[in-house]
Amino acid sequence: MGQRDTSPPSARGGAAVPLEKNTASGCHCAKTTRQLQPTVTGIREEVKLTLPGCMAEPELLLDSNIRLWVVLPIVFITFLVGVIRHYVSILLQSDKKLTLEQVSDSQVLIRSRILRENGKYIPKQSFLMRKFYFNNQEDGFFKKTKRKVVPPSPMTDPSMLTDMMKGNVTNVLPMILIGGWINWTFSGFVTTKVPFPLTLRFKPMLQQGIELLSLDASWVSSASWYFLNVFGLRSMYSLILGQDNGADQSRIMQEQMSGAAMAMPADTNKAFKAEWEALELTDHQWALESVEEDLMSRELDLDGMFSKELPSGIF
């Protein structure tokens, strides 16, 4: 039997392969880098040829052109579509018609709230007179006034159906069209990677359009990157367009799922009862009780007050 050749590769006539030490296991791995053929993903793969006892850890290096031609365009397109959707929803928004009774009830509630907050600045007799007008047990406003609440029905109110149709046109339709166009244009691209490890259950959510079992779940595809921007740009929309904007897709979808878009009107009778209880617990505390003594105890600079010349045209 012949002896086994243990000489290094350079002594046998082959090219020497650089060894890279694995600090975790203490072994050495032969590292080489090969450029794959251009694919739709634009991935350059770095492969480690491992010696016995080492574990293979392939790494993916994304092409810098993906950042310029895939990642940033998707962000800009999503943001601009949200801004356009906001202004289109403002143009299509219909003014809600208020009746004279609704305006009157809201003003009465405001008057009662102001009385509770600023009643300490009026005399006690004036406060009790106003409180008696609202909370008298026999003929007080909050006791004798009973409103009939009629819940709106989409079958009897065509304006509700119109508002629902406008909401679907401005919210659902652009999301479907832009999402389909982005999925077709940027199909198969790996855009970015989340900075923390994820389990395999996140692959269907973060890697739509890419079916690679060997790909780490932390990588994000172009289609998933679009949906992340749809729900992740709400802070930018609030900063530029304000809080109650029509570009916040997550808030609109939450309202549609919870039924807040078709919520019942506020029950005026319950509002009157709550305000009656709050005003009933409010006692008068005269805030200007010793204002005369406080004013007289101060040192008034009368000389400086009358030393200034009055304007000639004051009289």
Image (cartoon, rainbow, N blue to C red):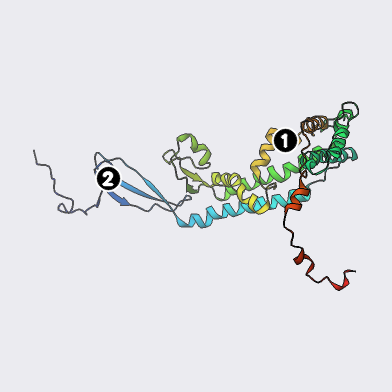
Check contact, mark 1 vs mark 2: CB within 8 A.
no
Disc 1: CA contacts within 10 A as few (<14), some (14-19) or many (>=20): few
Element under disc 1: helix
Q: Is residue 189 left or right of residue 112?
A: left
Res. 123 visible in picture: yes
Image vertical order of residue 165 relative to residue 61, above or below: above
Residue 281: give x, y in percent of width and height. 76, 31
**Is 165 or 284 nearer to us in this picture?**
284
Q: Quadrant of the N terminus?
A: top left
How many labels sit on residues?
2
Image vertical order of residue 91 relative to residue 112, above or below: below
Q: Residue at x 81, y 37 (%)?
A: 160
Q: CA distance from mark 1 to mark 2?
A: 57 Å
Q: Which residue is mark 2?
A: 23
Q: Is residue 208 left or right of residue 299?
A: left
Q: Residue at x 88, y 32 (%)?
A: 141
Amino acid type, callout 2: Thr
Q: Quadrant of the C terminus?
A: bottom right
Q: Is residue 311 left or right of residue 180?
A: right
Res. 152 visible in picture: no
Q: Residue at x 49, y 54 (%)?
A: 66
Q: Which residue is mark 1?
A: 260
| Residue 88 - label | none
